[in-house]
Amino acid sequence: MTTMRSFPGLRTVTISVEFGTRKKLDGLKPYFAAEAERVRALSVIAAAGLTPREAAARRSRWAEEKDEQRRRGVLIDSMRALITGALTQEVVERGWDRLERYELPHQSRGRWPGSSQGSWPEKITVDLPADLVIAVHVGCWDVSKEAVGKLRDWKERHPEARPNRPSRPGCSPQALADYQYYSAKVLTTGEIWRGAVTRGLKRIESHLPSRR
């Protein structure tokens, strides 16, 4: 059986976000650096007095512990950690950590009809755990596949329509309403990435020193 943890390593994700997000993340760099130094010091203390072999084993266990703490949102020592913790929570809450399959069918390739046309002026690029990235792609497809199929059928029936231009859609009001109904049922990976960034920024507020 293929599980989430069958996908080790990292995958690069580019996230389109609202204006001001990059500035917020840049403002957290001193906090990230302080946390990274704190855990580095702890790892040195943990290995003190051990033989080289024991120290290597302890560092390996400590690296695994840090990864788990990042997923739980306990350790936030980088932008990756901030998003990873929030994304893990999102995946668990949606039950995507318990999906039966983690393979994407060929029908899911490319941009889906009904995807959001929103304008996101900033982009951030981050390497995220591959298992989480795969779970999000598969989870979004699982949620959206029926609606995507309906929308593809709709486009075959209305090849000249422009449903994203409501004032001049090129189709009947009922056809436009049908398109909008199914579009609302499409959940894109972009929505999940943005939600993780927002959740991560909100979560870290409790870690920061209070400002008076």
Image: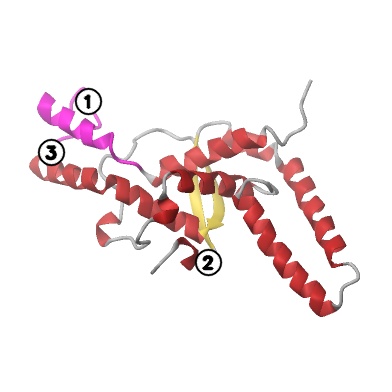
Is the Cβ of the residue at disc 2 closer than 8 Å to that at disc 3? Answer: no
Q: Farthest residue in the right direction?
A: 49
| Residue 8: assigned label | 2
The magenta-colored residue range is 160-187
Residue 111 seen in the current view: no
Q: Nearer the viewer, residue 63 or 180?
A: 63
Label located before the other in sequence (3 or 1):
3
Identify the residue shown where x is 54% and y is 55%.
128
For label 3, the SS is: loop
**Does 165 appear in magenta?**
yes
The correct choice, above or below, for 191 with respect to 70 in the image is: above
Pointer 1 residue: 166
Give the residue type at disc 1: Pro
| Element type where label 2 sits in the image | loop
Residue at 60% over, 33% down: 202
Q: CB of mark 3 within 8 Å of CB of mark 1?
A: no
Q: Quadrant of the N terminus?
A: bottom left
Of marks 3 and 1, the one in the foreground: 1
Report the amino acid beneath label 2: Pro
Q: Quadrant of residue 47?
A: bottom right
Disc number placed over residue 160 in the picture, else none: 3
Q: Main secondary structure of the magenta part?
A: loop
Earlier residue among tags 2 and 3: 2
Q: Secondary structure at mark 1?
A: loop
Residue 20: give x, y in percent of width and height: 58, 31
Q: Name which residue type carries label 3.
A: Glu
Q: CA distance from mark 2 to mark 3?
A: 44 Å
Tags 1 and 2 touching, CB below 8 Å = no
Residue nearest the viewer, comparing 21 with 185: 185
In the rendered view, tell whether residue 147 sits above or below residue 166.
below
Pointer 3: residues within 10 angstroms few (<14), some, or many (20+)?
A: few
Q: Earlier in the sequence, mark 1 or mark 2?
A: 2
